[in-house]
Amino acid sequence: MELELLAWGFGLVEGPRTDATGTLYFTDVTKGGVFRRSAGGTVENLIPDRPTVGGLALHADGGFVMSGPDIAHWNDGETRVILRHDDIKHWNDIQPDEDGSVLVGSIRSDLFDPKADKTPGECYRLGLDGSATLLYGGVEVSNGIGFSPDRRTLYHSDSTTKGLWAHDVAADGTVSNRRHIGREAFERGIPDGMCVDVDGNLWVAHVGGRRVAKLNPDGDLIGEIAVPAKAVTSVAFGGSDNDEMYIVTADNLDDASKGGSIFRARPGVAGVPTPLARV
């Protein structure tokens, strides 16, 4: 599959999201910052001093919700903190639900200190009333979060368990029937960010696998997109018909000087639309 290189020169790229105009938003976890790339290719750093932003979600009132040291809404230069927790090192991937509430994954371990104690994190739902509800814990290293097309299954990538947690979702938003899927696809390397297509298949960035892995809803590997990077960190659908795939990395094997890069592909299927956040 042909990949189009859109931007480069970053550290560890994460959180790709596109809006209706074709503008791409993304983050740089290691060098810091939240960036915006216009459809014409101009890139600007909107928040140059914000560290470890692993997830973004576009907001109905403009701007975006971002992770990092806290969960905050940025809009036109103003930042409003939504959630902060002193015991959580940082927050990672973000996924809005169809009502505008937001699911976020917490990371309690210091990922930049290999000798630090490993403490599992959780998944929270941030409600429209300002509440933060714990959905479940036991996530070693929280990464991509996504819903099935019918919203009845919630998937959560957990990197060091080398797979994804799948949960049934009830009408009231509670989850049950927790199971671990996809491990065989990530025996080498780890899963990172993810998205879901309209057929219900999962597309998972594979750090150490030099690919985006395509899994069926049971976690079986059924395809892949080869990517010229050792660390493929996240993936998201976008474009006017939601049939473009944006793939981000922490390196570039075609040209090491380019560093973290952003690619666009057309996988032949559309993604499940990402709702706007309303928290």
Image (tube, rainbow, N blue to C red):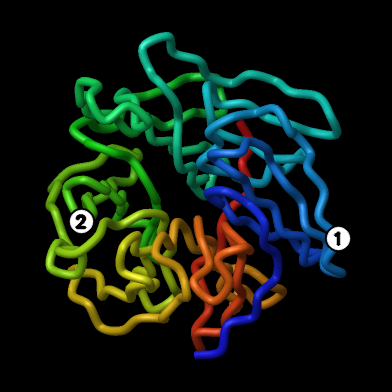
Location of residue 61 in the rendering, given as x and y in whole percent from the top left corner: 77, 38
Q: Is residue 160 left or right of residue 241?
A: left
Which residue was labeled with disc 1? 42
Q: Is residue 169 left or right of residue 188?
A: right
Q: Is residue 250 left or right of residue 188?
A: right
- Residue 252 vertical position relative to residue 136 in the rendered view, above or below: below
The residue positioned 69% from the left and 52% from the top of the image is 25
Q: Label 2 crowding class (10 Å Cα cut-off): few <14, some 14-19, many 20+?
A: many
Location of residue 80 in the rendering, given as x and y in whole percent from the top left corner: 70, 20
Instruction: Give the amino acid type for the residue marked by disc 1 in the picture.
Output: Thr
Q: Residue furthest top?
A: 86
Instruction: Give the amino acid type for the residue marked by disc 2 in the picture.
Output: Gly
Q: What is the number of the mark on residue 123?
A: none
Closer-to-camera residue (182/249): 249
The residue positioned 45% from the left and 30% from the top of the image is 91
Q: Is residue 1 left or right of residue 121?
A: right
Which residue was labeled with disc 2? 163
Between marks 1 and 2 in the image, the one whose residue lies nearer the viewer: 1
Q: Earlier in the sequence, mark 1 or mark 2?
A: 1
The residue positioned 47% from the left and 75% from the top of the image is 228
Closer-to-camera residue (166/9): 9
Element carrying mark 1 = loop
Closer-to-camera residue (81/205): 205
Element carrying mark 2 = strand
- Which image quarter is the C terminus in? top right
